[in-house]
Amino acid sequence: MFQLVRSVAACLALALPLLGRADVVHVAVAANFSAPAKALAEIFAKTTGHQALLSFGATGAFYTQIKNGAPFDVLLAADDERPIKLEHDGAIVPGSRFSYAIGQLALWSSKPAFVDDQGQVLKGGNFSKIAIANPKLAPYGAAAVETIDQLGLTAALQPKLVTGESIGQTYNFIATGNAELGFVALAQVLEGGKPKGGSMWIVPARLHAPFVQDVVVLKRAAGNRA
């Protein structure tokens, strides 16, 4: 994240002399990338004078909204599937799609020592609710479902699943205690590279398909200097 922030800041500083009036860019941001996006938006505003208005949610929901004419200029997705679809549909500025992150899944609880570092708590089943994001809308939700299946726990955990519309809502379910634990993005439970609190298991990448996160500039923003 910090390398990304520095790189973007340097690029914006070089671009500053070319920019005139302040413009606004509307950015749809996958919920897992909320914290870095907020940091980037602050640097963007200070460096260029332009403003980035951020909306957070599930990638699948944003894709549907964009297809239906939602006024977004940029999509920071939690996968590469939807950005590629938008590219194939001719809905983006040509050449604007690139990968900016690799998703990492974590099993997290706001309770200290509740989740062990091997994820054995899932097999113990000593909880009433486990939260995941909607797998049809959120790539992190799809990865959670795949992980549970790979562990052979689908039948055991299905009655306990609580589904959030986005990975952000899923995080809130766990943080507020409405679910004892759940699958979230690793970035959501780190601060300054260290765990925020509670307990977690970083899910091995072998348990789910890798998900690359892509960004695109949508065609409606072609003339927007911000």
Image (cartoon, rainbow, N blue to C red):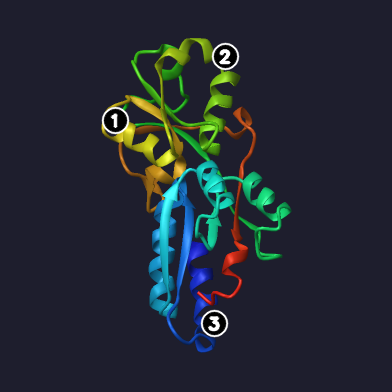
Q: Can residue 64 be seen in the rendering of this structure?
A: yes
Q: Where is residue 31 drawn, in percent x and y?
A: 44, 46
Q: Where is residue 94 drawn, in percent x and y?
A: 71, 65
Q: Is residue 169 above or below residue 149?
A: below
Q: Quadrant of residue 188?
A: top left
Label 3 is placed on what type of residue?
Ala
Helix, strand or loop at mark 3:
helix
Please report whichever mark, 1 or 3, sits nearer to the chain's N-terminal start. Answer: 3
Mark 1 vs mark 3: in front: 3
Give left or right: position of 80 versus 162.
right
Q: Quadrant of residue 196?
A: top left
Please report whichever mark, 2 or 3, sits nearer to the chain's N-terminal start. Answer: 3
* Residue found at x 48% / y 55%: 28
> Label 3 crowding class (10 Å Cα cut-off): few <14, some 14-19, many 20+?
few
Please report whichever mark, 1 or 2, sits nearer to the chain's N-terminal start. Answer: 1
Q: Where is residue 68 drawn, in percent x and y?
A: 55, 50
Q: What whole-number distance in Å separates the C-alpha atoms at marks 1 and 3?
A: 46 Å
Q: Quadrant of residue 207?
A: top right
Q: What whole-number distance in Å separates the C-alpha atoms at marks 2 and 3?
A: 52 Å
* Residue found at x 48% / y 43%: 58
Q: Which residue is mark 1?
A: 112
Residue sticking out furthest to the front: 68
Label 2 is placed on what type of residue?
Gly
Residue 152 is labelled as 2
Near-viewer residue (190 or 26): 26
Q: Which residue is mark 3?
A: 15
* Residue found at x 48% / y 60%: 27
Label 1 is placed on what type of residue?
Pro
Helix, strand or loop at mark 1:
loop
Q: Is residue 2 above or below residue 203?
A: below
Near-viewer residue (118 or 141): 141
Near-viewer residue (72 or 105): 72
